[in-house]
Image: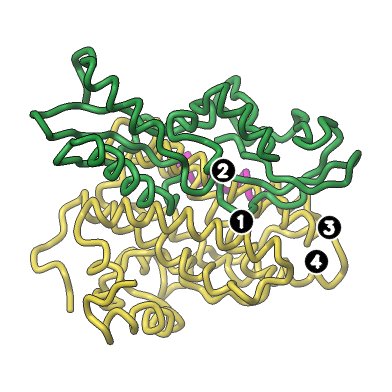
Chain colours: A green, B yellow
Amino acid sequence: MVTTAPTALETELLALAGSVPDPELPVLSLADLGVVRGVRVLAPGKVDVELTPTYTGCPAIEAMTADIEQVLHEHGVAEVSVRTVLSPAWSTDDISAEGRRKLTEFGIAPPRAHAVDGPVPLSLSIRCPHCGSTDTELLSRFSSTACKALRRCASCREPFDHFKEL
Amino acid sequence: MTTTSTPPDSRTEAALALGDDALVLSHRLGEWAGHAPVLEEEVALANIALDLLGQARVLLSSVGDEDELAYLREERAFRNLQLVEQPNGDFAHTIARQLYFSTYQTLLYGQLAAADGELAPLAAKAVKEVAYHQDHAEQWTLRLGDGTAESHARIQRGLDALWRFTGEMFQPVVGLDIDRTALRESWTASVTAVIERATLTVPSGPQSGAWTAGAGRQGLHTEPFGRMLAEMQHLHRSHPGASW
């Protein structure tokens, strides 16, 4: 756990690790997604990175780990260890405002913000990323990946993915 | 080959029980690949399986080598509920199994997440995932029950056939510090509400057979489990150390 304030080098390396694109949604960086929890320099040339999975079974975590290692190696860090941490659990609220904008631009309806813990929210309207209509319907709770649901817009008739609230 | 030479401690027992539930149900749901009634359900069941597999990996890795535990244990060393090892049957049968199990898992993880035990971090994460599994099962129970005479009859058959495996969920597990009375009451209330809304009948028979009570958690499994394990393990056992 990081207990002291990050150094200038740690801040720089965190930005580098965060710049890695998400392997499944390459429009988003890992920083946009909010999955890089911290970078700590343990010794010169030796760095520890904390990464949290979106879903427990997310298969992208291995690609993310390899990509972070590569970008830090290229920056001259000899030894990089990427650790997966579960707690506190990642939430779609961790996706940045910039990340939400990029998702919409990419044709994926961004997750709605959680107000409180509770049952799966289904009632608030979800806006079509293509035409902006809020008249959309759920086709399937699970889509191309576990984190997305498949919806259809009743106005423009286009199907689209919705990043589910988690 | 067994991987435990000494009696497992309570932490191991709890992680194996929950990890094996997730692993075995994940494998069963994976069997739907290429067979689901519609493409959306093909994807949904695979995604649910993937969530469960991720949970299983965390749980099994916390007490040993995940591959050894998954692929090299004999049937009697598995601690999963008999409910999750039951064959898929038709789609309605699978949905009935999903309704019973995902309701249990959501309530169980909810309790564990609220407590301060070793399983709390995983439970806090997984409870949000399984809430979607439960929602999926509930919506399908409603559609099938309140659908055609055929779909109604099939989901009722599934609910009835699997009812006798539900009592085991409320048996004590060493190392799992939960309020089992509250778990049972909440589970029964939740499942009853969905079944009745779906115009179906809550099964009335016993929730465990005389010969099966709590048996999965003790390593006693039903006959189809052996064949499932043979399929799940044969590649790893035939080619030790093989990788993609």
- Labels 4 and 3 share a subunit: yes
Q: Disc 4 residue type?
A: His
The spot of residue B140 in percent (x, y) is: 72, 57
> Disc 3 marks which residue?
B146
Q: Which of A122 and B5 is in front in this view?
A: A122
Residue A161 figure quarter: top right
Assess whether mark 3 and mark 4 are in contact (beta carbons under 8 angstroms): yes
Nearest to N terminus: mark 4 or mark 2: 2
> Disc 2 marks which residue?
B131
Nearest to N terminus: mark 2 or mark 1: 1
> Disc 1 marks which residue?
B99
Nearest to N terminus: mark 2 or mark 3: 2
- Labels 2 and 3 share a subunit: yes
Q: Nearer the viewer, residue B56 or B206?
A: B56
Q: Is mark 1 on a helix, strand or loop?
A: helix
Structural distance between the alpha carbons of marks 1 and 4: 15 Å
Q: Mark 2 or mark 3: which is in front? A: 2
The spot of residue B189 in percent (x, y) is: 62, 44
Query: Can you name the residue that lies furthest to the top here?
Result: A5
